[in-house]
Image (spheres, rainbow, N blue to C red):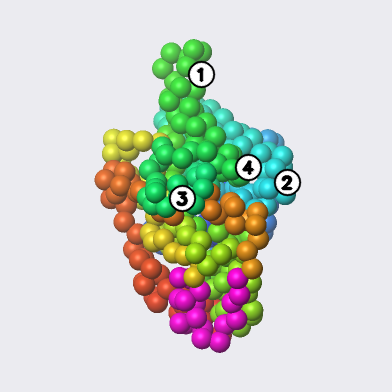
Amino acid sequence: MRKKIILITGAVGEVGQALIQTLTEQGATNLVTMDLQEMPADISGLSKHIQGSILDKALLSRLVSEYEIDTIYHLAALLSTRCEYTPIAAHQVNVEGTLGLLELAAEQSEWRNKPVLFIFPSSIAAYGIPDLETKAQFPQVKEWEWNYPITMYGCNKLYCELLGTYFSRHYRQLASENPIMLDFRCLRFPGLISAFTVPSGGTSDYGPEMLHAAAKDEPYECFVRPDTIIPFMAMPDASNALVQLAQAPRQSISRPVYNVTSFSLTAADIHDLVIQAFPSSQITFNPDVKRQGIVDSWPAGLDDNHAQKDWNWKPAYDVQRCFNEYLIPNIVKRYHT
Ligand code: SER
């Protein structure tokens, strides 16, 4: 019999590393991880790691011949800034990669006669608000509002939300009588901040970059205006949200896509919190017009009422706890001991 596993793609990314730890703390011993990169040594014992691409069909075939995939956390993606430099490659990874995994999950659901659970992180990048006046008028955006992304990444995420929904409700609707469909569930994350890793290739990166640079005593030039506002979340809340969504009883899930959020901050707020912790930090603001335009198109806040109601979503870290209990102490430990 094949071993039942939880598959995590893009597992060496920031969310992936946090998720491996969260699942392991909950007792998971059946994690199979995939990424183009090697697993960092400190967590390499927590999963069976396969170094390779989600676009490698032969690799995916080998995977299903060896394991029964019960749950997929599909995290592999190129982030928003990187995507704008290589939009076609971004589409291949973000959309075709997701399509391949959805197809695999659909086949596996049929084969084992039980839905594969498919957890997919989407993003505030799925929104696109036309101007700052409108952004101010809609301070807490609902899931179905302003779905007009202006980045390749945002378009990819929004389309994959729809693809996943299609695969879980209508896949092969004319070809098959009573197909066992996969169970697709998706979260839209705000900007994420980790004490242990730094993002690469995103546009909300100015938040974590400012903090990590200050902790390392390096100067930082912020690429957005001080008044720029978007929602953020501490990384442990992000990995918990994914696991909570995965573990919610199916009957409590009323929609395929949920907003989740913690707190909204301006770049100036982040600057002030960072200066409080690291008074000698040298932070300047030099907005990059293009990246500024992307962040300005993202909402100032998310309405996450549906997640609260359906599966009791509540972040553990508000802004004070996030900085005082999670970010600052762990970052100080990381760079100064
Ligand atoms: N953090 C992501 C990015 O900046 C947004 O989801 O691309």
Label 4, secondary structure: give it: helix
What stretch of residues is rendered in magenta? 269-285
Report the side of 213 relative to 259 (left or right). right
Question: Which mark is on residue 86?
Answer: 2
Task: Tell me which numbered mark, 3 or 4, is placed earlier along the sequence.
Answer: 3
Q: Residue at x 30, y 47 (%)?
A: 305
Instruction: Classify mark 3: residues with Cα within 10 Å, few (<14), some (14-19) or many (20+).
Output: few
Question: Which mark is on residue 133?
Answer: 3
Q: Position of residue 245 (x, y in %)?
A: 37, 46
Would you say residue 199 sits in the magenta stretch?
A: no
Residue indicated by mark 4: 152
Distance between the alpha carbons at the discs numbered 2 and 3: 31 Å
Task: Tell me which numbered mark, 2 or 4, is placed earlier along the sequence.
Answer: 2
Q: Is residue 23 visible?
A: no
Whether the residues at callouts 2 and 4 have beta carbons within 8 Å, the answer is no
Residue indicated by mark 1: 172
Please, what is the three-letter code of the amino acid marked with disc 1?
Answer: Arg
Task: Tell me which numbered mark, 3 or 1, is placed earlier along the sequence.
Answer: 3
Q: Is 128 rendered above or below residue 276?
A: above
Task: Tell me which numbered mark, 2 or 3, is placed earlier along the sequence.
Answer: 2
Would you say residue 274 sits in the magenta stretch?
A: yes
Distance between the alpha carbons at the discs numbered 3 and 1: 43 Å
Q: Position of residue 199 (x, y in %)?
A: 59, 61
40 and 224: which is toward the camera? 224
Q: Position of residue 6 (x, y in %)?
A: 49, 46
Please, what is the three-letter code of the amino acid marked with disc 2?
Answer: Thr
Look at discs 3 and 1 and give the one toward the viewer.
3
Distance between the alpha carbons at the discs numbered 3 and 4: 24 Å
Report the side of 107 relative to 180 (left or right). right
Label 1, secondary structure: give it: loop
205 and 331: which is toward the camera? 205
Q: Position of residue 313 (x, y in %)?
A: 32, 52
